[in-house]
Image: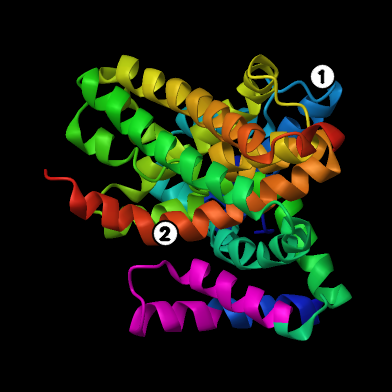
Amino acid sequence: MKPEFPDIHEIWVYLSGSPLLALILTLAAYQVGLVAYERLGRNPLANPVAIAVALVAATLSAIDMPYAKYFEGAQFVHFLLGTATVALAVPIHAGLRELRGRVVPLFAALVAGGATSIVSAVGIAHWLGADPSIVAAFYAKSVTAPIAMGVAERIHASPTLTAVFAISTGILGAVFARFVLDLVGSKAWWQRGFALGVAAHGIGTARAFSVDAEAGRFAGLAMGLHGILGAVVIPLVVRWIPG
Amino acid sequence: MIAGLVEILIFQGLGEIVSRFAVHFIPGPVVGLVLFLGWLHVRGSVPPAVDLVASALTRHLGLLFVPAAVGVILFWPHLKANLLPVVAALVGSVVLTIAAAAVVLRVFSGRSSDEA
C-alpha cells in the first residue's frame, strides 16, 4: 500500500499540538493590526494591539481552542515582555540626559499621575459596585503590563485580569490622549509624551513614538519610571488600605 | 545583535535572582531594568548591538502584550456582569491620569514649556 497523504484532520491535530499555531496566529493577527493602523493613517481608534487581540480571541472561539492551550504556544512571545522590560533601560538611559532642568516637573507629574490613576480607577470601580476581585485588579493598571502582572501577584490580585486592564488602559490612553491633551492645553511634545507614558505605559509609548520622536522618548521614560515607582509603592499602598 | 540579546538576557536573569533572594516585592524584570540602567550609566554609552535589540523590542512592545490580553476571554462572563464599572473606571481613570500629568507638567515647568 502506498503511503497516503494525511488528511486535513491529521494535519490539524499535529499543528494544534505544537506551539506553531499559536505563534502564527499571534504574529499574523498583530501584522493585520499594524497594516490596518497604517492604512487608516495611524488613526488612534485603529489600535494594532486591540485589533490583534480581537482577531485572536475570535479565532480561538471559532476553532474551539481553550486559552490555556493557546498560551502554551504564545508564551514564547509573552516571555519576551520581561526581556523588553529590561531593554527599556536603553530608552530611559537616553531620556535621562533630557531630564536636566526638568526633574521637578517630571517627578511631580509622575507622582500626580500615578496617584490619580489608582485613586480614580479603584474609586470609580468600587463606587459603581464592581466585584472586589475586579477592584483589586485596577491598582496596577497604569503600570506597564509585565510589571503590573508582577505587582498583581504580590497584592493577591489576578495577574491576567490586571494585564487585561493594563492593556485596555494602554489602548484607551492611546485613543483618547490627543483629545485630552488638547483639552487641557498641553502643547510641548515632551509634556504630551510624558503624560501619555505615565497614564498609558507601553501602548501609549508606541502611540507617542508613531506621532513624534521626542514625545516617544519622554513616554518611554515615563513608562519606565512609573514602572519602577509602581512596583515599589503599589504593594505598600495596598497594605495600607484596610480591606 | 546576538551580543546585545545576551547582555539583556543576562541582566534579566540577574534581576530574577536578585528579586527572588533580596527584594522580592519588586518583580524580577524591574530589578533587571534598574541594574541594566546602572550598568549603562557606568559604561557611559550604549553598544550598537544592545541598541539594536532594545529598539526592536520596544518598537514592537505592542505585539508582546497580545498573548496576555487575549486572556480577556477567560474573564468575559465576569467582566460582562461588571461592564459598567469596568468601562467607567478604565475610561475615567485614563482620561483623568493623562489630564493630571499634563496639567502638573505645565504648571511646574512654567514658561519654559512654551519654548519647547
Say if the magenta span includes residue B31: yes
Percent of width and height locating residue A92 = 69, 61
Q: Chain of mark 1?
A: A
Q: Position of residue A97 (x, y in %)?
A: 78, 63
Camera-side residue: A161 or A22?
A161
Q: In terms of sequence position, does the residue under pointer 1 or pointer 2 come before the other?
A: 1
**In this view of the protein, can residue A133 be seen by the observer?**
yes
- Residue A209, horizontal then vertical, whole percent: 78, 41
> Residue at coordinates 76% horizontally, 34% vertically from top-left?
B111
Q: Residue furthest left?
A: A243
Locate residue A241, reporting x and y percent: 18, 46
Relative placement, left or right, of A197 versus B3 is left
Residue linked to disc 2: A231
**Numbered circle sitting on residue A40:** 1
Dominant SS in magenta: helix
* Residue at screen point 39% across, 68% down: B26
Residue at image x 40%, y 40%? A115
Relative to A143, say whether B38 is above or below: below
Type of the residue with mark 2: Ala
Height in image: A44 above or below B105?
A: above
- The residues colored magenta run B13-41
Q: Quadrant of the C terminus of chain A?
A: top left
Q: Which quarter of the image is occupied by the N terminus of chain A?
A: bottom right
The one nearer the camera, B21 or B65, is B21
